[in-house]
Image (cartoon, grey):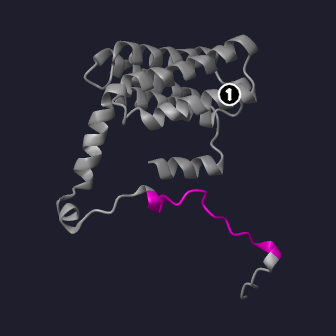
Amino acid sequence: MAAKPLEEEEREILSPPTDLRKKVRILSKREAKNFDPVKAAEQALERLSGKFDGWMSNETSELMTAYDAIRAEGLNKANLDTLYQAVHNMKGQALTLGYPLVGSVASSFCRLLEHVPGPEKLPLSLTEQYVEAIRAMVAEGARDTDNPTGAALADKLSEVTEDYLAQFPLKPEDEADDLMIG
């Protein structure tokens, strides 16, 4: 069946507020020939790398604030959402900011938060262990698996999480997510 064209009142044209073409410098042919976008990106990361520790500390502060709210107010959907957002941000940024071990722990923590059936089933002791592990890793500069204590802690947290989640049957959409993640 062919789709009907939209009536005038059923559609809206959105215009970007800023024309980004005005923000871009066009390279000459000579500049374009010698331009290496990967090298430019690596140089930009190198210039920013001095700020990575500060940014990671800020992310840790947000995680601690979210956890402190849970301790003060109890666990509810709003607090759980805030905690999840903080952990998810760390998971996404840790590798870029030079903390792959924290990224691994945050990934496992996200898995726990995503698959626990509800706030009442989230073990606060395990939650605290995750928060404290991330805080300690950032504070101590435990960046990767070269740190044996940090690596062992990450492995143990992941193992405990998988054991805990095994008691809850996966919903079909969770199974599909797990297949896609790998």
Specify the amino acid type for callout 1. Answer: Leu
* Image spot of residue 166 (x, y percent): 57, 33
Q: Is residue 174 left or right of residue 21?
A: right
Residue 80 to residue 68: above or below = below
Q: Residues within 10 Å of mark 1 (few under 14, many from 20)?
A: many
Magenta stretch secondary structure, dominant: loop
Which residue is disc 1 drawn over?
A: 80
Q: Residue at x 43, y 55 (%)?
A: 23
Residue 43 placement: quadrant: top left
* Image spot of residue 114 (x, y percent): 61, 37
Q: Is residue 129 magenta?
A: no
Viewer-proximal residue, 77 or 154? 77
Residue furthest to the bottom: 2
Q: Residue at x 46, y 38 (%)?
A: 92
Residue 15 placement: quadrant: bottom right
* Image spot of residue 139 (x, y percent): 40, 13
* Image spot of residue 112 (x, y percent): 57, 31
Q: Is residue 19 magenta?
A: yes
Residue 149 placement: quadrant: top left
Q: Residue at x 48, y 58 (%)?
A: 20
Residue furthest to the right: 9
Looking at the rendered image, the quarter that the N terminus falls into is bottom right
Viewer-proximal residue, 32 or 90? 32
Residue 29 to residue 79: above or below = below
In magenta, the rendered stretch is 9-22
Q: Residue at x 55, y 49 (%)?
A: 177
Residue 141 to residue 106: above or below = above
Q: Is residue 151 left or right of residue 174?
A: left
